[in-house]
């Protein structure tokens, strides 16, 4: 198959390119500049500005699948300006990508578009499947609009999959890159009470799910990109501390994080207990179902 990827230089995208190439697929990526960190077999295509989307898409050879991972990082202070950038990088960019695809003479068969479990909002102990409705707040509203734009590709005959991703665990990036430094110094601990649920997934399982989705013609709609066994923040803290052989007994108070991170800190205390019901019902099998095994499989985590 031939894949076109946005966000190929990110934490997920870099590894996805390697996996696709290793399995004999052809890969092209849209970016502002050629990446020196990506395998040179991946074909670079310039993506400079939203207004140039159609022109730049037309320069890409015919592809079978588009994997849309691009988007500005959520983990920053949510000033008004930052919220605008985050919305534009997801909602408007997805709109322009879909509009561009719609005008291509030879269209791909599937669009796999990133979303997030932030769609569900803060839901306490409620078990959340792909059938659960949206929550409230900035992230929930963002995800609803983001997914609506991706869904428009169906009118052009594409199969559309929206991947609501949880906390992605892997080496050299993602959530662990921010968590590990304080834990390694013995300063880790639960967030607040630690009772909030964390829905996580090992990066390799998420990438396998994306690749499986691209080749499974009957899979469409929403998939929760999460492992089958979410844990509470207190449980996550305990398992991470055990994996790196460090104590973790200093809780992070909510007020202090609010002062440092602003509104974005609320995301850390949202309880989202999402399970991958749709993926498992349709035959996807996880390599890392429990957190202990997932952490143990991440290279150099205990260094």
Image (tube, helix red, strand yellow):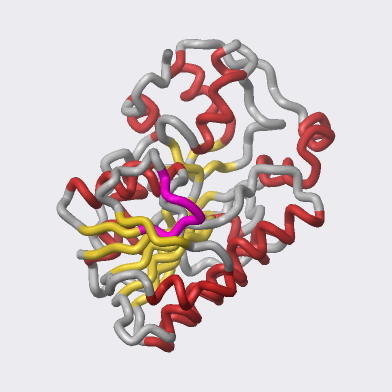
User: Where 178 sits versus 273, above or below?
Assistant: above
Q: Position of residue 166 (x, y in %)?
A: 49, 49
Q: Nearer the viewer, residue 290 or 143?
A: 143
Residue lying furthest left: 24
Q: Is residue 226 visible?
A: no
Is residue 159 found left or right of 172 in the rendered image? left
Q: Position of residue 92 (x, y in %)?
A: 61, 71
Q: Nearer the viewer, residue 45 or 157?
A: 45
Q: Which residue appears at 48% of the width and 58% of the height?
A: 164
Q: Nearer the viewer, residue 281 or 299?
A: 299
Is residue 87 highlighted in magenta? Answer: no
Q: Which residues are magenta?
A: 29-35
Q: Position of residue 271 (x, y in %)?
A: 62, 47
Q: Which residue appears at 41% of the width and 21% of the height?
A: 301
Q: Which residue appears at 43% of the width and 60% of the height?
A: 30
Which image quadrant for residue 83?
bottom right
Is residue 82 found left or right of 142 in the rendered image? right
- Tally of numbered discs: 0
Q: Is residue 107 visible?
A: yes
Q: Position of residue 279 (x, y in %)?
A: 33, 60
User: Where 284 sits versus 194, above or below?
Assistant: below
Is residue 218 found left or right of 260 in the rendered image? left
Image quarter hosting the C terminus: top left
Q: Which residue appears at 63% of the width and 27% of the height?
A: 190
Which image quadrant for residue 251?
top right
Which image quadrant for residue 220?
bottom left
Is residue 259 found left or right of 90 in the rendered image? right
Image quarter hosting the N terminus: bottom left
């Amino acid at each position: 198959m031939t894949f076109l990827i946005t966000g190929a230089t990110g934490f997920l995208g870099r590894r996805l390119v390697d996996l696709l190439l290793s399995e004999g697929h052809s890969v092209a990526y849209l970016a502002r500049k050629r990446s020196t960190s990506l395998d040179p077999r991946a074909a670079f295509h310039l993506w400079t500005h939203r207004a140039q989307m159609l022109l730049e898409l037309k320069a890409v050879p015919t592809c079978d699948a588009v994997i849309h991972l691009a988007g500005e990082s959520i983990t920053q202070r949510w000033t008004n300006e930052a919220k605008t950038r985050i919305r534009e990088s997801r909602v408007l960019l997805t709109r322009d990508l879909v509009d561009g695809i719609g005008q291509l003479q030879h269209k791909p068969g599937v669009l796999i578009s990133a979303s997030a479990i932030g769609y569900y909002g803060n839901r306490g102990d409620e078990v959340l499947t792909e059938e659960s409705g949206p929550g409230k707040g900035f992230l929930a509203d963002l995800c609803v609009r983001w997914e609506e734009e991706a869904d428009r590709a169906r009118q052009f005959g594409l199969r559309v999959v929206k991947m609501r991703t949880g906390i992605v665990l892997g080496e050299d990036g993602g959530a662990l890159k921010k968590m590990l430094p304080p834990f390694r110094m013995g300063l880790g601990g639960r967030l607040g009470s630690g009772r909030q649920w964390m829905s996580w997934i090992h990066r390799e399982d998420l990438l396998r799910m994306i690749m499986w989705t691209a080749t499974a013609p009957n899979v469409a709609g929403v998939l929760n990109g999460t492992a089958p066994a979410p844990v509470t923040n207190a449980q996550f803290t305990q398992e991470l501390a055990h994996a790196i052989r460090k104590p973790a007994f200093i809780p992070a108070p909510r007020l202090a994080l609010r002062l440092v991170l602003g509104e974005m800190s609320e995301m850390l205390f949202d309880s989202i207990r999402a399970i991958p019901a749709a993926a498992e019902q349709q035959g996807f099998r996880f390599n890392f179902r429990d957190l202990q095994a997932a952490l143990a499989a991440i290279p150099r985590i205990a260094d």
